Amino acid sequence: MTERERRGRRGRRSAGDPGETPKRVTSYRHLKNTFAPQAAFSEDRVAAMHDTALRVLEELGIKVLNDEARGRLKAAGASVDDDWMVRIDRGLIAESIRTAPAHITLHGAGPQDAVGLGGPDIAFVGVGGAPHISDLDGGKRPGTMADAANLIRLAQDFDVIHILAPNVEPQDVETHIRHYAMTRAQLTLATKPPFVYARGRPQALDCFEMIRIARGLSAEEFAANPYCFTVINSNSPRQLDIPMCQGIMDFAEAGQPSLITPFTLAGAMAPVTMAGALTLAHAEALAGITLAQITRPGAPVLYGSFTSNVDMKSGSPAFGTPEFVKAALGAGQLARHIDVPWRGSVGTASNAPDEQSTYETLMSMWGNLLGGAHWWQHAAGWIEGGLTASMEKFILDVEMLQIFAETLVPLAADDDSIGFDAIAEVAPGGHFFAAEHTMSRYQSAFYEPMLSDWRNFGQWTESGAEVASKRANGVWKQRLTDFTAPPVDPSVVEALDAFIARRSEAGGAPPVS
């Protein structure tokens, strides 16, 4: 047997062979959605849903609990009743849609950290806002600052995660100073764009100042470009509360994006039909976008969608369902109808990082991809309907996100890739392991998973028969062990700590409710 045939039987050259091909190099930092968006409704029905949402805001109105927000809306021409109901003319909404940008670039510490949102650009974001953390070792427990910092490290470490998230609530830090700890951790452990809480103007202004310190920005430079974001949830049906209104206005004034996201569960806080639930969500999102635009025309906003159904037996939220997927397709159509970047959502109702959590998450990811979502919120680590962030689930989801990222890469189809010479080289009944076409490409031809185990049953059993969640447990631990924080100028850290100490001594900033 020749050496080439021996190599062919193994399917790869030995390490160190003179002709060894370069190993595969991946980069998932700036992704483009190459899939054509799919439709849930005909265009005339999308137009009818949009028109109905305008009618809801004109005739029925939305309850706005924030005095300043009601005053701004009234000054812009909206009708305000004594019961805090605000009715918004469709002309005002149309003007607000016109001034909302169709594309946003969110900046991090350096040019490589910038994230495009809109058009074909997409971004993956981890779990946000969970009160609990879980892993296979310690089980479910209240989130701590150490847990939040570990999730920030993982988000920084995996380049398929593009933007930081509020991940878990660090309940070992008092709420009046919690925003300092979370913002400091994001700015010192990562370079990616950070999240900022919308829990009252004092907290927002504190975090804005910390970002300016860390990024070396003047107030004018900060206001000119997006450097952070917040999430705004309406209180469905048809209500905007005090802190959410305040957040919309604060972030609009600062030139920072709000993800204005109604959380409409069909059959509970929204009509039982997907079209009805989406229409209500659309009306609420339009109200939030309008408040942002009358505060500062051109303020960056994302059209948020988190529409799903409930279990009609228990009332519990359900995610990754057929209805969730179809609602994502419909939400994408409504977002494109007004030409505003769209924040989609990923979720599962499973209580553990198990098979249910995986297939429900995967289905919701497909809804985001085929619906054309620019921002995938909760795309790594979410379980229990968002009540828990799971360390193992974070790794399982990153594997799926990397597979999606690879799927977005267009296939090469040049003459060499089509491979007539390779086909001619191998005799009928032979194999392509030893073909030159294979040998020159085998190390970079295919995606190499970090988690999947492709060994046969005997080898898998002999090595411990570990299932994917158990392997994920080892992956996150190793990644944290190997993690090195990006370099930060010591003077920046000193300035951040001095600011935190000064503000903490003054009483911090209690959240507004």
Image: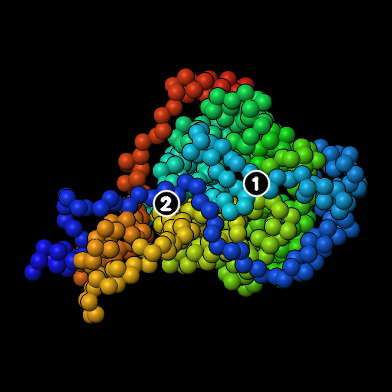
Q: Which residue is mark 2?
A: 391
- Circle 1 packing at 10 Å, graded few (<14), some (14-19), many (20+), is some
Q: Residue 512: give its label.
A: none
Residue 104 shows in the view: yes
- Residue at image position (59%, 35%) is 227
Of callouts 2 and 1, which one flags the residue occurring earlier in the amino acid sequence? 1
**Numbered disc 2: secondary structure:** helix
Quarter in which the N terminus is drawn: bottom left
Q: Is residue 239 left or right of residue 231?
A: right
Image check: 475 left or right of 337?
left
Residue type at mark 1: give it: His
- Residue 208: image x %, image y %? 62, 30
| Label placed on residue 103 | 1
Give, as a three-letter code, the residue at label 2.
Answer: Met
Q: Residue 150 at x, y = what percent? A: 42, 42
Q: Which residue is at a point 75% across and 63% down the rendered structure image?
A: 279
Measured Cα–Cα span from mark 2 to mark 1: 32 Å
Q: Nearer the viewer, residue 119 or 274?
A: 119
